[in-house]
Image (spheres, coloured by chain):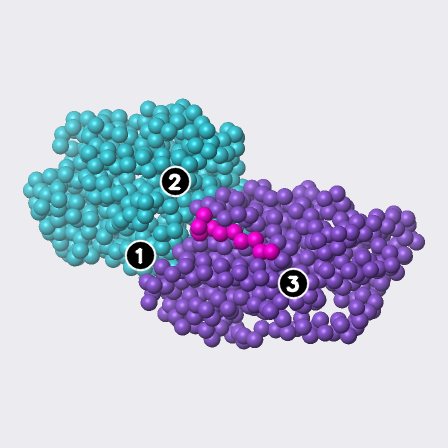
Chain colours: A cyan, B purple
Amino acid sequence: MSRFLVFIFFLIGLFAHCNSLDYNVGTYTQVVDHFNWDINLTFEQRYLYSDVYWDNGPFVVYTGNEGDVEGFWSSAGFTFEIAKELSGYILFIEHRYYGKSLPFGTESFDHDKIGYLSIEQAIADYALVIQHIKAKLGATDNPVIALGGSYGGMLSAYFRFKYPNVVDAALAASAPIYLAAGLANNHSFWEVVTADFQAAQEECPTRVRSAFTELQKLRDSGAAGLQEISKKFRLCKVLESAQQVDHLIGWIRNAFAMMCMGDYPYASSFFGKLPANPVNVTADLIMGADDALEGLVLGTGLFYNGTSNDTLSCFDPFTEYISCSDPTGCGLGPNSLAWDYQACTELYLASGTNNVTDMFAPLAWTLEMRDAYCQKTWGVTQRPGWFATSLWGNSISSASNIIFSNGALDPWKEGGVPKSLSDTLVALLIDGAAHHLDLRSSNPKDPPAVVAARKTELVLLKKWISHKTSENE
Amino acid sequence: MSRFLVFIFFLIGLFAHCNSLDYNVGTYTQVVDHFNWDINLTFEQRYLYSDVYWDNGPFVVYTGNEGDVEGFWSSAGFTFEIAKELSGYILFIEHRYYGKSLPFGTESFDHDKIGYLSIEQAIADYALVIQHIKAKLGATDNPVIALGGSYGGMLSAYFRFKYPNVVDAALAASAPIYLAAGLANNHSFWEVVTADFQAAQEECPTRVRSAFTELQKLRDSGAAGLQEISKKFRLCKVLESAQQVDHLIGWIRNAFAMMCMGDYPYASSFFGKLPANPVNVTADLIMGADDALEGLVLGTGLFYNGTSNDTLSCFDPFTEYISCSDPTGCGLGPNSLAWDYQACTELYLASGTNNVTDMFAPLAWTLEMRDAYCQKTWGVTQRPGWFATSLWGNSISSASNIIFSNGALDPWKEGGVPKSLSDTLVALLIDGAAHHLDLRSSNPKDPPAVVAARKTELVLLKKWISHKTSENE
């Protein structure tokens, strides 16, 4: 791939990413601990909004997940399409402890201050922000639609579970609620990543496997091996230990995970700067390389924007990837701290890799390892069973008015709700779609299945709020 | 009423109170703060249970309210009748901060330790205790019925709202959920008390009003008046100020409230030691007395067990009644502290009296007075709207499998759900019944309406758990 091509991809990425809708920024003085009156603290919670389409329709609310809320505004354009169709008010609420919604500013991640980070607190926040804005607009009876992708989709569902008095319908896109409750096969994430690359190029996983075998051999062959690996992967600094090679393996694996999640039919920048169909592009790179290890280097480099033809002159796996309690990655910066804490307390996430059911080098991540890490890092341990109790696990049949959509290419898909449970708990599996593609703005390159899914989603949401809408007219 | 009669009432009371079913006591190591992983504390939560009827049927769970759990075991015998009918396991869980379930022992009511007392924490407790016991018995798939009376009934409903994954059906008896959310007429409590006495004796409220007028006149006439009041009411100690007379008025009012709540057709001891039909008995005493004020003395005395014919030689309104944030009374002892805190933080309760819509002396209790009291006493202030947001207010139509029963004589009835909202949200108004009479053991003196209500309740509960039961067989 030439430097020119990468530049073009970059421009397309920017365009696809670019959202034509401007937002306003608001803040709400939020309660730090909703469940304890002796903690008499508040913080400023950020939200983005637009009333450009609003004509007394529903509130269309993105339940912000683990990141700056602007990132979701830029990548969940279907929200605007729903709002336009329903004359709705657009609201994106930032999740506490992410972005600028830090209850204790830069001290928020101190051990004695991070404890107010929980899903139960976060969805209570959403309820209060929504009610505040509705009251301000004199629209207390207008219906509310919640939507979100990934963890944000989980939050939309949980929000409807726990506050159906506030939210009338939800679109939970690519929301692995069963997995997060420890009730799904947690190897499936890496199995689907492997299958996606196999679907792109039948022999790709075999080649990746050989590359990892070679990498492990080098890892176990002393200083010369470490030097060889460092050179091969164009690292800025030579690796110093076998342990550091394991970090490198995590860094590689993270690139593959991100490319599968962001395997959209057009260039995008949500999961890093990716070309259209990054899995195909990467599989081609891997299969076209002179040897297996070089293939792995090129594939990984595509994601970290530093193949030999790209802008970075060398890679630093230690700043580009932070290993944490989530084996699929915690991201970078302060947001990664919050996510690390959440994966240590409530969320049950993917397993490590084993090279048996997946194509990656074995990199174990057992519950014991997680608990040891979390105790050491945060002084906390997950309470077995709490998450499935608090947020319903897979006993969700009494809920209503929720769409659980999943993309057939998405590594998270097997952690979600696989089939409809009733007329008002509807599962959609979207062919040719990666992680919450349906939430993104409509695009000429969209596969037909996502076009159809968005139509279905709109019909259902409209129907589920219709009772309230007609009362309100 | 002769001393002999009182003794007979006392024996009948004991008998009606006495529960033929023995219980076992268990404790569960409970999490102090379910929503904060940095608070790494636990406490021993008490529960009572019996498997005498159990044959792999449902768990029939009383969601304990503001008192020692044994008190509910003794007064909610219908629980046992349900369990017997359905081969169920009987479980009564004590509410945190009540009885022996004190998270910090005798320090539990310290300002820095009482903050973990909230409804959200309490229903999370119930979920975990139930799951623990089910797991221990290898009965994780058996259905669960929750039931409770008054605040315990509210908890049953909230428990089903928030944890339908744990509880399949609920009987919320005399549960003023709309009132507690600030969404009902909060004068209605005293209005119904007044109406109950009027129904017993048409002229009774008029006579009570004159008595209060006289009492106020004496209150406002200096030392001689205070002496006169103290003598009239057989007080152990002479009142020293007009303020103390206001406390006396609260003490009197409390007696009337309790007698209306406990206006059962047989002697009982749940709301103090009461004869059968205490409202009729009291109305007769009032109307038969030589003058209005003496009527008030006799009526009040009946409740505090100290009329001239009874065992107490004098009354002490300051130990027999504690004025607190709940104008209908907080009870006595440490449990009253916990309830005071709850009425200061989450619960919105009855108003004061005004002598316009009720028969009592005006004794104001505004939200401003409440907030000032709560700030002074506990350093807390209710957050307007939180309760209705967290626990759904009157937007409950998405819930299912809940019976809201109310007694037509019960002062709380107008704070509850007045009519059925669907086939699975059923309201029952029970003629001739006081506060959660339906939860009590069947009794030959029961009015026909409560016999019919219990039948309906059993049919509905059985139906709502039938799906799970048949799966389990």
In percent of the image, x 79 and y 68: which residue is there? B1
Residue where numbered disc 2 is placed:
A169
Amino acid at circle 1: Leu
Residue where numbered disc 1 is placed:
A183
Q: What element does badge 3 sit on?
A: loop
What stretch of residues is rendered in magenta? B422-431
Q: Alpha carbon of mark 1 to alpha carbon of mark 2: how far?
A: 24 Å
In percent of the image, x 58 and y 56: which residue is there? B430
Q: Nearer the viewer, mark 1 or mark 3?
A: 3
Residue where numbered disc 3 is placed:
B264
Chain name for mark 2 = A
Residue B412 picture location, percent across and down:
62, 52
Q: Nearer the viewer, mark 3 or mark 2?
A: 3
In percent of the image, x 38 and y 56: which residue is there? A388
Residue B358 seen in the figure? yes
Quadrant for the C terminus of chain B in the image: bottom left
Residue A269 vertical placement versus A175 (above, below): above
Q: Is residue B30 magenta?
A: no
Q: Nearer the viewer, mark 1 or mark 2?
A: 2
In percent of the image, x 49 and y 73: which residue is there? B50
Q: Nearer the viewer, residue B95 or A27?
A: B95
Q: Nearer the viewer, residue B203 or B83?
A: B203
